Amino acid sequence: MKIEWPGWQRFLLIVLNTASAQRSMTGGDGTNEIRPVVLSIAYLWRNCSYLLFTDGETSGYEALAKVRLHFLCVIVIVVSDRRVFLESFAESSLRGRLLSGTSTLIAVGRLRPQDVEALSAHWTFSMYNALVFAPGSSDGNSRINSSDGKSSGGNSKRWNLYYYMPFTASGGRWIALGHWHPSRGLILQEGRSLLPKKFSNLYGATVNISALPYKPYWMEETNSKGDVIYSGSDKLMLDAMQSTLNFTSRALKVTTWDEVVQRVSERKAWTAPIIHAVYPARLKRFDFTRTYEHDINQAFVMAKPVLEPKWQSLYYPLTNEVWLCILGTLLISCVGLIGVIRGSEQMQQGKKIASGGVILEVLGTLLGQGGLSDRLPVTLSTRLLVLIWLFFAFIVGTLYKGNLVAYLVAPRYPPRPETLEELVKVVKRVTMPYFGETLRELLRNSETDSLRSLGNMMELGHDIDEGLRLTLHNKYPHLGSLRFLQYQVAEHYTEADGTSPLYLGREGVMPILNAWPIPHDAPFKEDLDFVILALIEGGIYNKWMEDWLDEAKKVGRQSRRRQLEAGVPLESWTGDFPTEASVDSEPRALTIVHFQGPLMLLGFGMVFAGVAFIAESLVEWYSSAKAGEIRLRLKEQAIEKLF
């Protein structure tokens, strides 16, 4: 079977161990055993560049890892007869990120069967595309072959090609793909491909994952038997992966989010199947799958502004200019009417009307309570002036009362921040869980003033429950993923009528890419990405998310309704806080807030009237006492004159 290699641009690195490999390459014993094999492999990549290491050092791979990023595919050839060197290379190349999921590793050396078997214990040889050339028998009866996977030995002119499959029906094992012969080159066995897919079918294997509850992406519940039941949108996506790739998952025991990603970076867990924001700092510890939830940003939640008691409720229906105009008109009308009345009284020699009474009657007509027509002189000028004033008072009073009713029924609520720029202007403290340290450092180093200000305001260490309580009672906004905040508000802070005392900002804090953490250069990334892409492009994932959010709203409303039916007061409810009246909701009764202005005016009036009454009583008592003293003195003087 002839091998056809794709015409990709490749970069070939040859790592040689000086002690053994060069001796084999140069044929120290005159046999030139390995050199023809390496030259034959190099011929397959004859358009590649070569970088040759002959010092046997297993270091410097970090620099080479940066070089391979500029090429579509990297082919690494390791030549050594010693298993110890190959194992050291496997560990060093893994730390240095020399290989990637699309790389191909080719190991060539006179290895014993047990040496080949031992290489499968290393992630580099078991998970990556790793081919091993080792001597085999010319008759094909190698002791490691495609059928039994056992050991070998034989004629050194024949080199068997082995490939480790970590997941098969009988478990992980080495398989023989073919052999190389000096006269015939590389020949694959019938039905074999050069690089079989390792992760398209895991044959029911158990894969470790690490996760913590993060609604609605990942949720955990314990049933009556003590078993943990997982649910959520990301759990459904994991189920789809398990069905497609044929594996089962086992959640490792973790207690913090640092442990969740630590298990992934250590390769103890394949992935953390929960949405994580893709930050540059995190890329230093682990990689990510294909991104999803592209329209979901970091958002903030705040308490809706509520009406605070204000005496200005009587003042707000008219603007300042209108009030000044009414006051000026009132003064002018009082002065003009008093002047006209005084002139008419002189002409008609009628009974005089006190000026204070005129002013009181004018105010009464403005408030719809007075009547001047039966007490005024009957001159034409007086009647015309009164008629004009009554018409003006009617128009002003009607407009004021109508606007006052509209203002009381549909009050003007204080403005609420909806964007990041508005948020940083009105708050001085923002809460977030402890895992927001990465985001805070990112915001503090931002070139945008609003983002940098937000980073300086952030206070970490508040979980979602504590953060929302601070939001409700102290007006501190809480940061988090948009879907996560939507779910928490829907489930725990929704009234029976569907309203909530909380709201989410119309614009997010900043756009964020989201994905699942996976180990650096994970070779199974392509297979996971395939499932994620299918679910996202098909709209299935978004449908799952909508269903979970709708269910949370339904549960929240039902829970609140049951509490209301049981007579549970609002103060004992989890989501305790007064909500604002909605314009679109049913009419609601006016509260004490609406009538604080009239009540304060009445109270102040009664206080002033009481003070005036006491003052008048004191003046009257003093006047009476003074008059009594005068009368007594006059009486005494009269008696003295008589005697």
Image (spheres, rainbow, N blue to C red):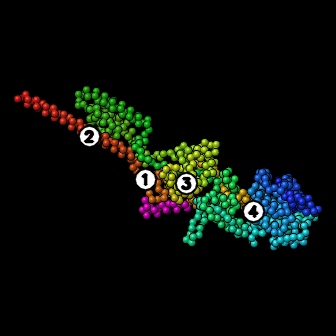
* Cα gap from disc 1 to disc 3, whole angstroms: 36 Å
Q: Nearer the viewer, mark 4 or mark 1?
A: 4
Position of residue 147 measured from the top left corner of the image (x, y, whole percent)? 82, 72
Most frequent secondary structure within the magenta stretch: helix
Query: Which comes before the other along the chain, label 2 or label 1?
Result: 1
The structure residue drawn at horizontal position 38% and vertical position 47%, both measured from the top left corner, is 595
Residue segment shown in magenta = 551-569
Task: Say above or below: 67 vs 122.
Answer: above
Q: Are circles 4 and 3 on residues that touch, CB within 8 Å?
A: no
The answer to whether residue 409 of the structure is visible from this angle is yes
Query: Which comes before the other along the chain, label 4 or label 1?
Result: 4
The type of residue carrying mark 1 is: Arg
- 34 vs 473, left or right, is right
Pointer 3 residue: 462
Query: Which comes before the other along the chain, label 2 or label 3?
Result: 3
Pointer 2 residue: 614
Pointer 4 residue: 123
Task: Say above or below: 496 vs 457.
Answer: below
Q: Are circles 4 and 2 on residues that touch, CB within 8 Å?
A: no
The type of residue carrying mark 4 is: Trp
Local secondary structure at mark 1 = loop
Local secondary structure at mark 2 = helix
Q: Quadrant of residue 233?
A: bottom right
Q: Nearer the viewer, mark 2 or mark 3?
A: 3
